[in-house]
Amino acid sequence: MNEIPASDIPRGNWVDRWLPEAARPYARLARFDRPIGTWLLLFPCWWSLALAIEDWSDIKTVLWLFILFGIGAKIMRGAGCCLNDIADRDFDAGEARTKDRPIPSGQISVKQAFAFLALLSAIGFTILLQFNWFAVGLGAASLILVAIYPLTKRFTYWPQFVLGLTFNWGALLGWAVVRGDIQLPAVVLYIAGIFWTLGYDTIYGLQDIEDDPLVGVKSTALALISNMRFWLYIFYGAAIVLMGVAGWLVELSWPFYLGLGLTGLHGVWQVWDLKINDPHDCLAKFKSNRLFGWLFLGGIIAGHIV
């Protein structure tokens, strides 16, 4: 296997250039300098909003909802990373890629991390209160999954499934914000997102496949390594089929299926071109899911307005 990067913390970016030294560890703890996680949390929200919105002529309201979810995803992804790093601080200290993170490296104490988590959670809850009460309750319910996920890698080889349940909650929430309930298209989209997460986070987990057994961490990458490409095709294939069903249920027009086809081709490319033993390529393929998300979102919007 190719050499694993010494640290997953990028250096010399806007955090180092623009933030005071005391603020930098907090920005890194919340992964503000690594936006891909925010995108992966945000896209199911935006997909669901786009599926649920019927009146696209009210562009100000549409943009406001998209902006609120964008800010909320940034904040709540940061809060989730805080909680994850608090729970995983001992594991992170034992892995080459994560030992320089703020908590295991001693830049931030556990007490300081909890205080920062409380601040981010308060901001996130303030954003949630801008929506209807059904959506507020639904959003609050996701905290159960947020709390459970960091513990799952200790006892199951499928923590990516729990991550999928957590990261795709926005597929339900976006619909609830627009329609005030949960209907079948949102549920189908939610399940599709879970399969998508199983795909991209299994790819991500390949970076740690050597260190994870040494520190006692489990993952789908470890469980499925003997037949990795087959399972990745299953995950992405199921996601694409269910995404298509969600669009069909809301009767989107033909451009949706063009966007869906491009999304599917991107998923196939990820699996076909993946260099399983190259952590750098695994990280690049993982990050490429931002394009996957944009292609599908574009298809949904085009299917509404064309």
Image (cartoon, grey):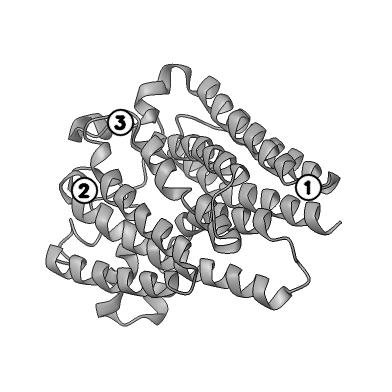
> Which numbered disc covers residue 210?
3
The residues bearing labels 3 and 1 have C-alpha atoms spaced at a distance of: 45 Å
**Lateral position of residue 288 relative to residue 264, left or right:** left
The residue under the point 41% across, 81% down is 18
Residue highlighted by disc 2:
88
Residue type (three-letter) at the residue carrying disc 1: Leu
The residue under the point 44% across, 73% down is 127
Up/down of 192 relative to 72, above or below: above
Q: Residues within 10 Å of mark 1 (few under 14, many from 20)?
A: many
Q: Which of 69 and 82 lies nearest the eye of the viewer?
A: 69
The percent position of residue 275, horizontal first and vertical second, equals: 52, 31
Residue type (three-letter) at the residue carrying disc 2: Asp
Residue highlighted by disc 1:
252
| 3 or 1: tag closer to the N-terminus | 3
Q: Are marks 3 and 1 in contact (CB under 8 Å)?
A: no
Q: Is residue 190 visible?
A: yes
The percent position of residue 34, horizontal first and vertical second, equals: 44, 60
Q: Nearer the viewer, mark 3 or mark 2?
A: 2
The residues bearing labels 2 and 1 have C-alpha atoms spaced at a distance of: 43 Å
Quadrant of the image containing the N terminus? top left
Q: Which of 61 and 225 lies nearest the eye of the viewer?
A: 61
Q: Nearer the viewer, mark 2 or mark 1?
A: 1
